[in-house]
């Protein structure tokens, strides 16, 4: 089995790398044809274009890895079948399940690799490609740009509502702030009006303002202050548009947003779906290979490069359609976040098990 495993693994890895490079090249050529004209019209430098396609290449690798694994599995099993090597394996009394361990191992390696990439690297790549295209090329600006917001209203916890006229300094300074503190019956107890709310030494502080307390008898108590501590549990980056695009958020940032929204009793379904999807999508590589194994064993001799590519493309598009449908249903609240993110994977796993049962019967 060690000799057989090494032989199958060697063939599988060679074909997988060839498929991965080929798919990336096809995707890259199509993508560059669409983008290069726009870049040249904005007089972008070669270095800047190269930087864009570097980060774009990371995104493309993440997207084509499942299809590359699926295609490599079909082609490898097709070659083994055409060379009558699968027949020889069966004649030697070796179970096909044991002989296909290298394929399952490849699927697990790809899935864990994608999971690691999706933890931080892929969100950063999305952020950089948007930044380079939208700001440095299309807008012709250099240096780091902060997309600051204005006229922001948000809820903090159960009892507080904040209003901010302008965000400055990358979210570290909030200008002309009003904060309303409400009781359990949603009655206004007191409010703070401040010229600035600043983030200093890892905490927020009101500067130059006044606190107004509303008495039950209608009386007002007004107290002016120079500095007043705030218990606001937000980071400066939360007030910049660039960082709060959901595709730019790493897994820890998404989880932090979920906690923040839950503590504020605000809807968090969209972020919960995203968090589950960041784990579910990488597992698709293993499941796609799992589905390809019985199909490749049954139809191996009839699967050439063209047919294998067509089958892989069809299955990948079907998976992506079901996956996107599940996410949409989860964000709409029709399905729970966990089920919506794993919806496509559950279908692929069920189909794979059905194909294995049919293979055993035959």
Image: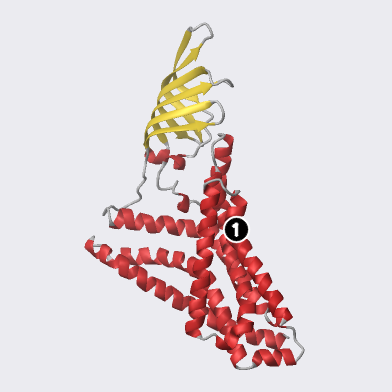
Instruction: Tell me the residue at 50%/58% (across/down).
Output: 324
Instruction: Provide residue 283's location: percent of width, then percent of height.
Output: 60, 64
Q: Is residue 33 above or below residue 359?
A: above
Q: Is residue 160 left or right of residue 177?
A: right
Q: Nearer the viewer, residue 167 or 257?
A: 257
Q: Is residue 296 above or below residue 183?
A: below
Q: Quadrant of residue 208?
A: top left
Q: Nearer the viewer, residue 103 or 135?
A: 103
Q: Is residue 320 left or right of residue 176?
A: right
Badge 1 density bin: few <14, some 14–19, many ≥20, Cα 10 Å: many
Locate the C terminus and report the quarter of the image it occupies. bottom right
Instruction: Tell me the residue at 36%/64% (across/down).
Output: 51
Instruction: Provide residue 36's location: percent of width, then percent of height.
Output: 29, 67
Instruction: Provide residue 1's location: percent of width, then percent of height.
Output: 73, 86
Q: Is residue 96 above or below residue 44?
A: below
Q: Secondary structure at mark 1?
A: helix
Instruction: Tell me the residue at 54%/85% (across/down).
Output: 303
Which residue is farthest right?
93
Instruction: Provide residue 187's location: percent of width, then percent of height.
Output: 53, 18
The residue where tag 1 is placed is 343
Q: Quadrant of residue 15?
A: bottom right
Q: Nearer the viewer, residue 351 or 22?
A: 351
């Amino acid at each position: 089995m060690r000799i057989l495993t090494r032989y199958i693994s060697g063939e599988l890895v060679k074909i997988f790398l060839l498929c991965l490079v080929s798919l990336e090249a096809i995707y890259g050529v199509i993508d560059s044809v669409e983008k290069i004209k726009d870049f040249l019209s904005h007089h972008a430098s070669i270095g800047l274009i190269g930087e864009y396609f570097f980060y774009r290449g990371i995104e493309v690798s993440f997207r084509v890895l499942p299809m590359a694994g699926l295609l490599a599995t079909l082609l490898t099993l097709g070659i083994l079948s055409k060379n009558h090597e699968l027949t020889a394996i069966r004649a030697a009394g070796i179970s096909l399940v044991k002989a296909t361990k290298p394929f399952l191992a490849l699927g697990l390696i790809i899935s864990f690799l994608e999971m690691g990439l999706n933890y931080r690297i892929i969100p950063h790549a999305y952020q950089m490609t948007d930044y380079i295209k939208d700001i440095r090329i299309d807008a012709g600006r250099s240096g780091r740009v902060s997309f600051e917001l204005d006229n922001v209203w948000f809820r903090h916890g159960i009892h507080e509502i904040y209003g901010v006229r302008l965000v400055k300094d990358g979210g570290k300074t909030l200008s002309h702030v009003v904060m309303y503190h409400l009781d359990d019956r949603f009655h206004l107890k007191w409010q703070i009006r401040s010229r600035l709310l600043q983030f200093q030494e890892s905490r927020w502080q009101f500067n130059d303002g006044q606190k107004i307390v509303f008495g039950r008898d209608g009386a007002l108590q007004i107290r002016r202050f120079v500095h007043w501590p705030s218990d606001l549990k937000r980071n400066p980056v939360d007030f910049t548009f660039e960082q709060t695009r959901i595709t730019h958020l790493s897994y820890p940032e998404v989880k932090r947003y979920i906690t923040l929204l839950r503590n504020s009793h605000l809807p968090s379904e969209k972020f919960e779906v995203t968090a589950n999807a960041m784990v579910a999508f990488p597992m698709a590589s293993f499941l796609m290979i799992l589905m390809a194994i019985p199909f490749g064993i049954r139809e191996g001799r009839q699967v050439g490069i063209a047919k294998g590519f067509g089958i892989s493309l069809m299955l990948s598009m079907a998976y992506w359609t079901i996956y996107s449908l599940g996410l949409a249903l989860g964000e709409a609240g029709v399905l729970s976040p966990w089920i919506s993110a794993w919806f496509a994977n559950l279908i692929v796993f069920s189909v794979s098990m059905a194909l294995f049962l049919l293979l055993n019967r035959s």
